[in-house]
Amino acid sequence: MAGTAGETPELIKVHSGAVEVPYDWHCGPYWSRFFRGLRDEKKIYATKCPSCGRVYIPPREVCGPCFARMDEWVEVGPEGVIEMFTVVRLPYTNPSTGEPLSVPYTDVYVRLDGADTSLMHWLDETDEKKIAVGMRVRAVFRDKRTGTMHDIEHFKLI
Amino acid sequence: MARRTAIVGIGQTYHCARRDDVNGQELINEAVTRALEDAGLTMKDIDAIVIGNMDHFEAINYVDGWSVDGSGAFMRPIMKLTTGGTSGMTVATAGYYHVASGFFDVVLAIGWEMNSSSDTTAAITTCCQPLIERDFFAGAIGPLAAEYTAYIKRFGATEEDAALVSVRDHNNALNNPHAHLRTRITVEDVMKSPVLCYPIKLLDMCPRSDGACALIYACEGKAEKLAPRPAWVHTIAGSRDFVYMGEPFQHEELITLERASARAYKRAGITDPLKEIDVMELYLPASTTGVKWMESLWVCGRGEAPRLIREGVFNMDGQLPVNPSGGPLATNPIGATAMIRVGEAALQIMGKAGDRQVPNVRTALATAFGSCSWSDVTILRDTKP
């Protein structure tokens, strides 16, 4: 080895610096219709399985358990029930922007009225003592909408 | 009919928060060298290699290529596999398949991770679909924390129940020279530690570690010569479920683990896992999962896990010791974490677990977990299948 007795050889670490790789992600017809519904109608659209009848949000082409193609669209929400939640206090890096995320924020898993799955989004309350599983919430839409999940600003307790 | 196959060698590195004394290839070589020593083999005896990790933690792709000198793969077949948190058991499973298929006699499986290379939670978050859920998904911690709020609501479990699991695993790790965290803790320490994502606190959550693990699988005829007490693979079962975090079945039980373990028990002829399994090495990324997921392993009914935990059933001196090694709460080099579960289960069968040895282990179970709620199960025994 390079070092001799009594010396501690220097160990070198190299920092990458900020790495930014832009990507293009394709939404396909199902997510596109979902996002158009949020943007143009302030409505939340889901797909229903012709085999098991389960209503899926976010909408998708195939019901996984049945491996059946879904063609039926149904409107769900904009109200629903908190199925579970967490108040995030751990600061970490937003991998989509490279910027630190602002904490605390609250993730809620909302079982929208008429849906059989839950939608993950933010709740505008970060005091866990004021939040409980089973509480009813409503989607708050932004005034300026661009066809993304953030056309819903957050959910609020009713 | 698959060829009978056993684990005959286990190698683990020194695991800690930051292995800045080695690069990735050197870390891998440390595990490989130790596994070969453990089995009394040299690289000449290895017919094929399987390796895996989660590339996005280091942002260097193709470990099967760049690690060749250190992994021993020069002029040998090597295959890389990545499946998320389950990667280590997927790689171990592939090592088993390589031998059981009859194509190779002695195969090396390697799982590794240099988690200190990046912000682990940010990197994990990239597993989530960027257009639908990524912005709302706080890495591994967020959904695990959220699912425990649903479990608390349904069954009246408490944060203290989870803390008991954390205390058990952390204090078990005191007996494991390979554990990253080796500090005695109390329920009070857990409850007073900072909240990461309510209701999960710092001492409820696994650390991120740098480390690697290597296993050597050998066929019947060779395994008995290489190890006085080989750990025979009886069955491996895995299940995957949904694409999104908010799908049904996920929140109050872990359906993938229920299905995978039920299948594994059936194949291994196990009807009462609490009585028939001698030790479990479980991929418990958070203490809360050590409460809720016990029910998905069929060792108790729905909502009964908190009582069993309070009674100490899964402690080292209990009926079914869980995580004598300390589990992921003590050591978590993510691409190796699930392989360490298999390796620790094998050590228990082989009677080589040192201070963390459970007496008279004949049947051992290991699990792996990866998001979005994937589960794998391996059952090892001291007898041939």
Image (cartoon, coloured by chain):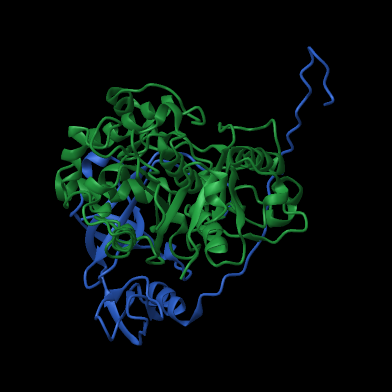
Chain colours: A blue, B green
Picture coordinates of residue A136 (x, y %)? 19, 57
- Residue B133 appears in the picture as rendered: yes
Position above or below: A123 against B114: below
B102 and A117: which one is in front? B102
Is B383 left, or right, of A49 in this rendering?
right
Position above or below: B61 against A70: above
A7 and B150: which one is in front? A7
Residue at 68% in and 51% down: B45
B83 and B34: which one is in front? B34
- Residue B335 appears in the picture as rendered: no
Is B222 left, or right, of B332 in this rendering?
right
Q: Quadrant of residue A2?
A: top right
Q: How many marks?
A: 0
Residue at 45% in and 25% down: B182
Residue at 25% in and 61% down: A138
Residue at 18% in and 41% down: B157
Picture coordinates of residue A155 (x, y %)? 30, 57
